[in-house]
């Protein structure tokens, strides 16, 4: 933001600030997405393991309502 002087009221400065804020928000959203995606994958693996264990002992897997 070197092009944008502090307390400048120019339209260019406002656009630069908005762009920087959008970049930070995008980075945070991307990081959150990857963390959540990894957690979902871990949980799906655990569900699959539990399902296999239930089948191994001939325990019926209950249906889930949507």
Image (tube, grey):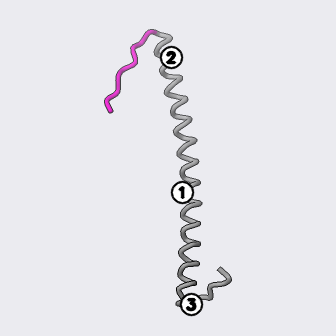
For discs 1 and 2, the disc positioned in front in the rendered view: 1
The residue that disc 2 covers is 53
The residue that disc 3 covers is 8
Give the magenta range.
58-66
The secondary structure that most of the magenta stretch takes on is loop
Regarding mark 3 in the picture, which secondary structure is present there?
Answer: loop
Residue at horizontal 36 percent and vertical 20 percent from the top = 62
Q: Check the picture and name the quadrant holding the C terminus.
A: top left
The mark nearer the N terminus, 1 or 2, is 1
Where residue 29 appears, x then y in whole percent?
Answer: 54, 57
- Against 49, residue 59 (above or below) is above
In the image, 15 versus 28, the foreground residue is 15
Crowdedness of circle 2 by 10 Å Cα count: few (<14), some, many (20+)?
few
Residue sitting farthest toward the right: 2
Where residue 24 appears, x then y in whole percent?
Answer: 58, 66
The residue that disc 1 covers is 29
* Residue 9 lies in the magenta-colored region: no
- Against 27, residue 36 (above or below) is above
The mark nearer the N terminus, 3 or 1, is 3
Crowdedness of circle 3 by 10 Å Cα count: few (<14), some, many (20+)?
few
Q: CA distance from mark 3 to mark 1?
A: 29 Å
Residue at horizontal 52 percent and vertical 39 percent from the top = 40
Residue at horizontal 57 percent and vertical 47 percent from the top = 35
For discs 3 and 2, the disc positioned in front in the rendered view: 3
Q: CA distance from mark 3 to mark 2?
A: 65 Å
Regarding mark 2 in the picture, which secondary structure is present there?
Answer: helix
Give residue 20's quadrant in the image. bottom right
User: How many numbered discs?
Assistant: 3
- Against 59, residue 24 (above or below) is below
């Amino acid at each position: 933001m070197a092009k944008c002087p502090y307390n400048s009221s120019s339209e260019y400065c406002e656009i630069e600030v908005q762009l920087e804020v959008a970049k930070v928000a995008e980075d945070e959203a991307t990081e959150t997405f990857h963390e959540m995606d990894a957690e979902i994958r871990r949980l799906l693996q655990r569900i699959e393991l539990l399902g296999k264990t239930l089948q191994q002992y001939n325990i019926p897997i209950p249906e889930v309502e949507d």
